[in-house]
């Protein structure tokens, strides 16, 4: 399929669109939050024994990894610390907030680097359910 030429790419020496720069910055921020101590502690809290974790939503005990999806290589994480308050608010950012690339970064950073109580360790199924519900909510709020 021919690439659309109409997307403006004003960033990174005219190679990146607004949304590409936004994901570029977000992936860096998320990478920095990977070994954030409160997050590590939230996962440790859910540990039952070696390789077994208790989901803090369905309260079932699960092996900590699941086999990869058929079309993917990586094993799926079955004990993942989820932000109780999603990093990107489902209701969108406040109208009067100061944004760049349509994100209020002060708010994003505040929500990303939270303390232990703001994490819930979820199994793969509970985590995907929550993510799906949030995305549905986001789409509704966009209209
Ligand atoms: Zn669960």
Image (cartoon, grey):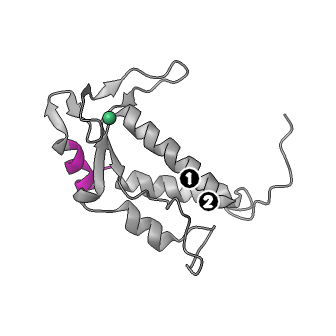
List the single residue furthest toward the top.
70
Q: Quadrant of the N terminus?
A: top right
- Pointers 2 and 1 in contact (CB under 8 A)? yes
Please tell me whether the stretch drawn in magenta is mainly helix, strand or loop: helix
Q: Secondary structure at mark 2?
A: helix
Residue 128 in the figure: left or right of residue 122: right
Q: Residue at x 27, y 51 (%)?
A: 39
Q: Residue at x 39, y 64 (%)?
A: 111
Locate residue 9: give its quadrant. Answer: bottom right
Q: Residue at x 22, y 34 (%)?
A: 54
What residue would you read off at disc 2?
141
Measuring from the top left, give residue 88's x and y in whole percent.
49, 59
What residue would you read off at disc 1?
137
List the single residue furthest toward the bottom.
96
Magenta extent: 34-43
Considering depth in this image, is 114 or 122 the residue closer to the camera?
A: 122
Measuring from the top left, give residue 99's x and y in whole percent.
59, 74
């Amino acid at each position: 399929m021919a690439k659309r030429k109409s997307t403006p790419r004003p960033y990174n020496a005219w190679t990146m669109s607004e949304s590409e720069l936004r994901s570029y910055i977000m992936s860096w921020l998320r990478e920095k939050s990977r070994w954030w101590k409160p997050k590590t502690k939230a996962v440790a809290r859910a540990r039952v024994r070696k390789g077994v974790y208790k989901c803090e939503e369905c309260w079932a005990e699960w092996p900590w990894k699941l086999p990869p999806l058929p079309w993917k290589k990586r094993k799926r994480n079955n004990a993942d610390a989820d932000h109780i308050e999603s990093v990107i608010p489902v209701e969108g950012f406040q109208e009067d907030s100061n944004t760049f690339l349509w994100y209020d970064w002060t708010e994003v950073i505040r929500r990303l680097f939270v303390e232990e109580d703001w994490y819930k360790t979820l199994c793969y199924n509970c985590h995907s359910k929550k993510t799906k519900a949030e995305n549905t909510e986001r789409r509704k709020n966009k209209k």
